[in-house]
Image: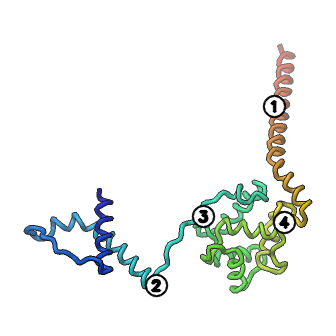
């Protein structure tokens, strides 16, 4: 009910502001000192005022319309050219240099990262690095945009002397042989696509074999212990 009332008030206030309707005085009875009316409408009026002020700022060009967040995504489905281990390594590196822990790497954090990697960049160089993968134009790197650096590196889309190429080369994350994206010919792409589809099955088989081997070793140890125990009886 409170939401409907607020919506009705907002609609009427906007109509009055646009000249589509004239304000009407309402007889409120015999007010005593205003103390009874204010608590009932204070919160609604405050919220309504904030909405109207925001609308006015946008109309006058003094504010930026908020865009929906693009942070939520699944890196394992969107960046299928990389293994889970590689994405985990990239995520670990990203979080290491996200000093503000806000899920972004800004200009200063990128500056510290490049210095840590032993390849310091100029202010303009750092801005160009961000610009090359900054899809939402917020002048900082999200984790998705950070992954784009390695996708471009794997596909050979980065200039050899660019800052991003240096970052990918010095990151200790080898992406040179991964992914269909970086394949040079159709045949290579087909081969790597098959490898991609079989990779997780291979990892599962390896885990199963390791567990089977471990179980066998435990069985042998138990048998040896029983044999040793029986020798002392």
Q: What element carries label 4?
A: loop
Q: Which of 228 and 200 is in front in this view?
A: 200
* Real-space CA distance between mark 3 and mark 1, rounded to the nearest whole angstrom: 43 Å
On residue 113, the disc is none
Q: Which of marks 3 and 4 is nearer the N terminus?
A: 3
Question: Which residue carries the number 3 mark?
Answer: 71
Q: Which of marks 3 and 2 is in front?
A: 2
Q: What element carries label 3?
A: loop
Q: Earlier in the sequence, mark 1 or mark 2?
A: 2
Q: What element carries label 2?
A: loop
Q: Residue at x 9, y 67 (%)?
A: 29
Q: Residues within 10 Å of mark 3 (few under 14, many from 20)?
A: few
Q: How crowded is mark 1: few (under 14 residues within 10 Å), some or many (20 or more)?
A: few
Question: Which residue carries the number 2 mark?
Answer: 61
Q: Nearer the viewer, residue 173 or 8?
A: 8
Instruction: Tell me the quarter of the picture where residue 149 sits.
Output: bottom right
- Residue 229 in the image: state x and y as whole percent: 82, 19
- Asked whether residue 118 is in view, the answer is yes
On residue 215, the disc is 1
* Real-space CA distance between mark 3 and mark 4, rounded to the nearest whole angstrom: 25 Å
Q: Is residue 15 left or right of residue 148?
A: left
Q: Residues within 10 Å of mark 2 (few under 14, many from 20)?
A: few
Q: Earlier in the sequence, mark 3 or mark 2?
A: 2
- Residue 72 in the image: state x and y as whole percent: 60, 60
On residue 182, the disc is 4
Q: Which of 46 and 183 is in front in this view?
A: 183
């Amino acid at each position: 009910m409170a939401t409907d009332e607020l919506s009705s008030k907002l609609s009427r206030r906007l109509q009055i502001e646009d000249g589509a309707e004239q304000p009407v005085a309402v007889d409120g009875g015999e007010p005593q000192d205003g103390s009874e009316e204010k608590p009932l409408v204070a919160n609604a009026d405050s919220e309504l005022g904030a909405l109207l002020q925001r609308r006015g700022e946008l109309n006058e060009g003094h504010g930026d319309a908020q865009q929906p967040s693009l942070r939520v995504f699944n890196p394992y489905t969107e960046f299928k050219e990389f293994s889970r281990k590689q994405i985990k390594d990239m995520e670990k590196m990203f979080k290491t240099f996200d000093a503000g822990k806000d899920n972004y790497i800004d200009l200063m954090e990128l500056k510290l990262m490049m210095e840590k990697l032993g390849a310091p960049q100029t202010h303009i160089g750092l801005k160009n690095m961000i610009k090359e993968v900054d899809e939402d134009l917020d002048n900082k790197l999200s984790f998705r945009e950070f992954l784009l650096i390695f996708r471009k590196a794997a596909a050979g889309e980065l200039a050899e002397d660019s800052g991003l190429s240096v970052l990918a080369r010095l990151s200790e994350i080898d992406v040179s042989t991964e992914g269909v994206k970086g394949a040079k010919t159709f045949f290579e792409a087909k081969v790597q696509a098959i490898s991609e589809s079989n990779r997780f099955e291979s990892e599962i088989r390896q885990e199963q074999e390791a567990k089977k081997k471990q179980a066998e070793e435990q069985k042998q140890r138990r048998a040896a212990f029983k044999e040793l125990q029986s020798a002392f009886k």
